[in-house]
Image: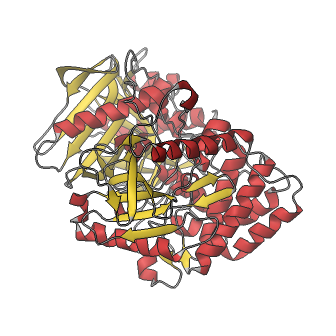
Amino acid sequence: MKPLGRHDPRAAGRHQLIALIGQGAMGRVLLGRSPDGRLVAVKMIHRHLARNPEFRARFRLEVQASQRVTGAYTAAVMDADPEAGEPWLASVFVPGPSLRAAVDQYGPLPLGGLRLLTAGLGSALVEIHRAGMIHRDLKPSNVLLAQDGPRVIDFGIARALEADPQITSTGTLVGSPAFMSPEQASGHELGAASDVFSVGAMLVMAATGESPFLGASAPQTLYNVVHNHADTSRVPAPLRPLVDACLDKDPARRPDPRQLIDSVVSISGRSGWPTEIRQQVARDRAEAERWVEAGGAVPDESPRHTVRWVAAVVVPLLVVAGSITAFLLGRGDPPADPLANRTLELTDEQLRLTDTCALLGNDVVGKVGQPVKPELADSSVCGTKFVATDGRQAQLTVAVGTAVAGKPLGERVAGRSMLDTTAGPRSCGRAVAVRDQPALGVEVRISDADGDTCTPATDALTAIVTRLVTNAPSVNPPKQSVVRLIPCESPDRNVLDSRVGAAVPAAPIDAHTCTWAGVPFVVTVHTAEGKRVDLDPKYTRFLVNSGPLGDLPAARRIDSDGTCATYHLVRPTIEDRGEQIAVTARPTAPGAAEAACAATESVLGGVVARLRSL
């Protein structure tokens, strides 16, 4: 926590404000004390955002939803003023880590902790559904582990059970993909059973440390939620039947919240959090009380009062469209530069497997602007509309493992020279290279924006590089995923020699693309997740006869210069996306155009064979 700044208010309604817990692009969260002495967490929207009628309307709906829900296992809303110049919401301060932070730091919960978590979540859902609401965004970061049980927070995207289907099914994807229900991931109308599915997914994560549906990308994750069955083999046996029932794809077959509570009665053992979590709850409570005792001044930091700070979520935070993410509590002192004496180093495998969309999360780029909905363009590229701190909207795109080339700026970030890769008006690009020949690296581009775009682009690149240096996010695709393929090693060398000439060297283009410049063809292989071309009427669909591999469904495009591109869909992911292998043959000799498509088919067969051998 930090002391209040000069411009921070000292009160919100009747609540005295004590300290700053955290802040982001949408607002800040402050520690407060109500007139009866209880501690409160006050979420306050930035004044300039409050001038946006749509944003204020969404916050007003969040307040209404939060006030409808009461109960022992939710963080009760005590007061709110959505009409204030800086709209605010005060809820009971809950000391303790989020479920996500607790599992990340201390590991999976033992059976006693799972028993308490199950009963608490069931009780919370009883209260939420009794109030006529569906939460719609139950996930580990929205569950706080208080001393006596879990607390469900974040009603930013909750909706009434009796709401018009047009309100709950507008085609806009809201929520967290890894913990959505199949009906939510598919954009269908939701019922109370959707929240039960989310609880099942959280119980798997709490028991194993891993999300049961997390894929290589958001589209892959959504596909897994809709079509794949979770592996619950590592969930403790007494809890496994209940978890399997919660994760049934058919909402009608899932248990109701009261059955969640009843199910733990037969589980032997004492309910309760492990010692490490109980100790953290006590530390968080003591820290808040010290700030209150100090009256907002910096508390005594003598050795007997030193508290080890941990990544604990104690309050809901602001994100765009009224949804809420988690802040990580930091030290009161200015944090050390995480890039000091550090150099950004990424192996070729890390370049292929980096989760680019995770780099556009609020926890990474929140100081630059608020990401709206990151969307994967290609395995290396993810983009999002975002709201800058000045309220303007723009497009923010990050690429990892792509070719970077630009003018050195004289600045360095994580030991790497920063490059200016700007191309075109109303945009700015910033990049760093992490390897040479070819120069591959990390690039950030801000486009469709007016005013200064280079300052936020530089800040975004620094934030993204910091995440890559300290805790690089990576995808976990299936074993036989095109994302895992090393493109320069994927074709059959004998086939290549027959098509481009013997001993033509492989030349990597980016993390997912390789080319062989020979005669009579230049052959290029690209292995990544992207937009499916078999759905595009500009491409001709057909079957490639690949002998023992069988017939491979494919789509083809032939350019005016005779270049032939053949695409094979390995697996669909979600909506119009899929994992694909693309082989292109560009003629470099007279008369070669007629054989270009045959060349792509033969090379494709070798790549598919390599993929199936993984």
Residue drawn at x 56%, y 81% is 132
Q: Is residue 342 placed above or below 264 in the rendered structure?
A: above
Q: Is residue 161 left or right of residue 90?
A: right
Up-down relation of residue 163 to residue 135 (above or below): below
**Residue shown at 45% from the left, 64% from the top:** 35
Residue 85: percent from left, percent from top: 24, 65
Who is closer to the viewer here, 609 or 133? 133
- Colour treatment of the image: secondary structure
Q: Say which residue appears at 75% left-offset and 61% top-offset.
A: 244
Is 154 displayed left or right of 520 in the figure? right
Could one spot residue 294 in this view of the protein? Answer: yes
Please identify the quarter of the rendering in which residue 334 is found.
top left
> Percent position (x, y) of residue 217?
49, 47
Residue in front for this viewpoint, 135 or 219: 135
Res 257 → quadrant:
bottom right
The residue lying toward the viewer, choosing from 225 and 80, is: 80
* Residue 549 seen from this side: no
Q: Residue 90, percent across and down?
A: 43, 63
**Quadrant location, the C terminus:** top right
Q: How many marks?
A: 0
Q: Quadrant of the N terminus?
A: top left
Residue 265 vertical position relative to residue 563 in the rendered view, above or below: below
Query: Measuring 70% from the left and 56% from the top, which residue is drawn there?
Result: 148
> Is 578 displayed left or right of 410 in the figure?
right
Camera-nearest residue between 62 and 206: 62
Give percent across and percent down for residue 286.
57, 43
